[in-house]
Amino acid sequence: MTDPVPVWHRLAGSSVLLDGFHALKHAVRFGAEVPVAVTADRAATLALADELAPDVRDALAGLLTEVPYETYASLVPRPHPTAVAALAVRPSRESHLARLARTPRTAPVVVLDNPRNLGNAGAVIRLAAGFGATGVVTTGTVDPWHPTVVRGGAGLHFATAVERLEVADLPAGPLFALDPEGDDLRATKLPDDAVLAFGSERTGLSTELRARADHLLSLPMRPQVSSYNLATSVAMTLYHWSLAAPLQGRGELRE
Ligand SMILES: C[S@@+](CC[C@H](N)C(=O)[O-])C[C@H]1O[C@@H](n2cnc3c(N)ncnc32)[C@H](O)[C@@H]1O
């Protein structure tokens, strides 16, 4: 059996770290290419797969190599309780841009306008995956494939198209920007080809994004409250979209 450690060191700099069993499970389910995967306890990991992810159990069995716990711990920034880690190939920007540009779209694209909190960005990618959104686009300096964002996304970056773009290059489609000063979201039906934009945690929507918006929408909120958290705002908006959209293709994620 090939020693996974040299492979890991060769690929680590250019790959996506899947930190823990659930991240690996999701990534494999959504077609990630995983050149190396390690576990400190193969039997325990496969028992977890039998229990939680029988659909990918055999694929995981083929990927995972057992290494001593100390070896596993030396490969990751912080050991995960499941003692599982893997490296995945980052999907090409070109393939994502093609998915984001494809029309007609059957589910919205979420835009995070200059997000600052990496955990929020990860939570939004997880939401987008759960709702079957076409993709998550970020503007600004944060790399949406940063390891902390990937950790927050629980391996679900592979279930949607995640890319960074300039505001001028956002996908086509009616742009609905969420802002406490907008019209009540509850009176609006969000179309499947909507581009749903959310502002930065610190400063809200940028001038550039506002200028591009076709509609400004607000979430219901009592007067004394200034704003909601970014990820919870995305959750409410995608849920509102889903109420009017068919459920087809969005019932597969459970764990
Ligand atoms: C934490 S808030 C930004 C707060 C920021 N201090 C501001 O000036 O807007 C992050 C983003 O969540 C969305 N958001 C939060 N509360 C909202 C609400 N009540 N209605 C619509 N969007 C909201 C907006 O897109 C907002 O830009």
Image: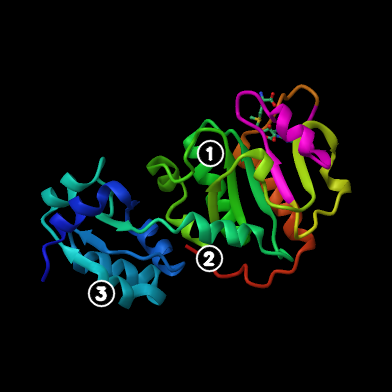
Q: How is the image coloured?
A: rainbow
Mark carried by residue 120? 1
Task: Label 1, secondary structure: give it.
Answer: helix
Q: Marks 1 and 3, how far apart in space?
A: 33 Å
**Which label's residue is closer to the chain start, 2 or 3?**
3
Residue on which the image places disc 2: 253
Q: Amino acid at mark 2?
A: Leu
Q: Magenta segment range? A: 195-222
Residue on which the image places disc 3: 62
Task: Label 2, secondary structure: give it.
Answer: loop
Residue in the image at 80% along x and 57% along y:
191
**Which label's residue is closer to the chain start, 1 or 2?**
1
Hey, which quadrant is residue 79 in on the image? top left
Instruction: Note whether residue 160 is visible.
Output: no
Image coordinates for residue 222, horizontal then vertical, percent: 79, 29
Q: Marks 2 and 3, how far apart in space?
A: 22 Å
Are the residues tagged 1 and 2 within 8 Å (C-beta)?
Answer: no
Hey, which quadrant is residue 52 in on the image? bottom left
Are the residues tagged 1 and 3 within 8 Å (C-beta)?
Answer: no
Q: 33 or 249: nearer the eye?
A: 33
Image coordinates for residue 142, horizontal then vertical, percent: 49, 35
Image coordinates for residue 21, horizontal then vertical, percent: 33, 59
Residue in the image at 80% along x and 61% along y:
244
Q: Amino acid at mark 1?
A: Asn
